């Protein structure tokens, strides 16, 4: 098997959130104005990373915490459903 070269750690918790909430990567790619392939590379760590503005947009649209899903995903095991705000969620401002 060929070894996959990653540019950053994959966002497995965000990927699981998408699966659990039946959100397609195509939907997120459309939200960000990029191809599904580019989004998949962002999520899996094989391409560039998300920009801060992209993370902000994702978190606001899906009402999730940047800390929990992108910055410190190993800290919490809770996975809120779309529309349910985390108790300790920090406000994301534009």
Image (cartoon, rainbow, N blue to C red):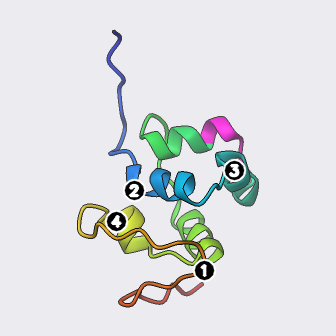
State the image coordinates of residue 82 (x, y, percent, origin top left).
59, 73
Q: Which structural element holds mark 2? A: helix
In the image, which is nearer the foreground, mark 2 or mark 1? Answer: 1
Q: CA distance from mark 3 to mark 2?
A: 17 Å
**Residue tagged 4:** 71
Residue 17 lies left or right of residue 13; in this view the side is right
Q: Which structural element holds mark 3? A: helix
Residue at 51%, 67% in the rendered image: 52
Q: Which structural element holds mark 4? A: helix
Q: Quadrant of the C terminus?
A: bottom right
**Residue 29 has which mark?**
3
How would you rate the neighbour count of disc 1 (Cα within 10 Å): few for under 14, some for 14-19, many for 20 or more?
few
Q: Earlier in the sequence, mark 3 or mark 4?
A: 3
**Residue tagged 1:** 83
Please state the extent of the stretch shown in magenta in the rendering. 34-38
State the image coordinates of residue 21 (x, y, percent, origin top left).
59, 60
67 up-or-down from 31: above or below: below
Depth check: give the residue in front, 75 or 79.
79
Residue at 59%, 63% in the rendered image: 54
Depth check: give the residue in front, 52 or 14.
14
Residue at 32%, 17% in the rendered image: 3
Q: CA distance from mark 1 to mark 4?
A: 21 Å
Quarter where residue 72 is shown: bottom left
């Amino acid at each position: 098997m060929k070894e996959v070269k990653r540019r950053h750690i994959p966002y497995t918790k965000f990927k699981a959130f998408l699966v659990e909430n039946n959100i397609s990567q195509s939907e997120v790619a459309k939200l960000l104005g990029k191809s599904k392939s580019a989004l998949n590379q962002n999520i899996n760590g094989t391409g560039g990373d998300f920009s801060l503005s992209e993370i902000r947009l994702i978190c606001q649209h899906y009402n999730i915490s940047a800390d929990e899903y992108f910055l410190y995903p190993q800290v919490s095991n809770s996975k809120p459903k779309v529309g349910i705000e985390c108790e300790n969620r920090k406000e994301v401002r534009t």
